[in-house]
Amino acid sequence: MEEKYEGGEIKIQSPFMKKIENFWYHYKWHSLIALFLIVTITVCTVQMFTREKYDLHVLYAGKSDIKQTASDGLSEHRILHASLKPMLEDYDENGEVSLNLQTLFLPSAEEIEEINADLDIGYEVQTQVVVENQKQMDGLMLLSEYYLCFLSEANYLAYRDRAAGFFVSLTPYVGDASVSYYEGRTDAVYLSSTAFGTMPGWKDMADDTVICLRSVSEVARRSGKNNEKQFARAEQTLRNLFAMKES
């Protein structure tokens, strides 16, 4: 079909293009929303199938600033990771053992003062880093798959006192191992009192570092079965850890 404009210019208007323009005029926003949803679903699906799945998630939070990189040799994080990984099992039975070790530099106010006053350390604590780590810690302790925890005394007490039964008793997992509990309580064991506490990296942790096991909250139970699966994996890892004998 031909349409004539001023100046004798002739423009050919295809019936198909007419339909496209008409459709776009009436359904532009519907189309954009549908396209957005398609892209979002596609990206989420790709991430879901490509992201690494771990046998266990473990959390450390305390006054040790664990370095992720090293100029020479293995980083502090890699050393801790390598020492802890043999305590795990292939829980998902995919043929390999994988560990996600999250470390947070989270000293107390008193510990920050001590660090800043120590001239041999050579640096001051960045308050903003600690604030951001505290926010992350609160989220992880409220609802996450990090059930097995290595905490400084200050962090342990801060969360223990928030709710009764925040951490569970470790007595069922200790077995016949000779360990020291925190002030006679059974929900925290001093890392240094275990054979595992002599492993590379872990033996350098502060003396007040304790091992804890977060309980599964009602919110976590309702959110999905994976929380209970991760809790069970943390339980078995604790059994393996306490069963370790000093060489």
Image: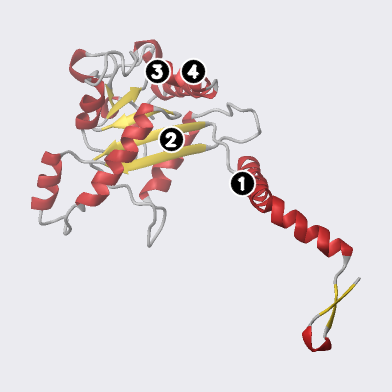
Q: Earlier in the sequence, mark 1 or mark 3?
A: 1
Reading the image, the residue beneath label 1 is: 40
Mark 1 residue element: helix
Is residue 239 shown above or below 145? above
Does residue 208 appear in this view? no
Q: Residues within 10 Å of mark 2 (few under 14, many from 20)?
A: many
Reading the image, the residue beneath label 2 is: 84
Residue 107 lies left or right of residue 67; in this view the side is left
- Are the two marked residues, 2 and 1, in contact with CB atoms closer than 8 angstroms? no
Does residue 186 appear in this view? yes
Q: Residues within 10 Å of mark 3 (few under 14, many from 20)?
A: some
Reading the image, the residue beneath label 3 is: 217
Q: Residues within 10 Å of mark 1 (few under 14, many from 20)?
A: few
Mark 3 residue element: loop
Q: Nearer the viewer, mark 3 or mark 4?
A: 4
Q: Nearer the viewer, mark 2 or mark 1?
A: 1
**Between residues 227 and 191, which one lies in front from this camera angle?**
227
Q: Earlier in the sequence, mark 3 or mark 4?
A: 3
Q: Residue at x 34, y 51 (%)?
A: 67
- Are the two marked residues, 4 and 1, in contact with CB atoms closer than 8 angstroms? no
Distance in Å between CA atoms under marks 3 and 2: 26 Å
As drawn, the residue found furthest toward the front would be: 6
Q: Which amino acid does the dot numbered 1 rest on?
A: Thr
Q: Earlier in the sequence, mark 2 or mark 1?
A: 1
Q: Earlier in the sequence, mark 4 or mark 1?
A: 1
- Are the two marked residues, 3 and 2, in contact with CB atoms closer than 8 angstroms? no
In the rendered image, residue 198, in percent from the top left (x then y), is placed at 33, 34
**Between residues 65 and 239, which one lies in front from this camera angle?**
65
Q: Earlier in the sequence, mark 3 or mark 2?
A: 2
Distance in Å between CA atoms under marks 3 and 4: 9 Å
Q: Which amino acid does the dot numbered 3 rest on?
A: Ser
Q: Identify the image quadrant of residue 176.
A: top left
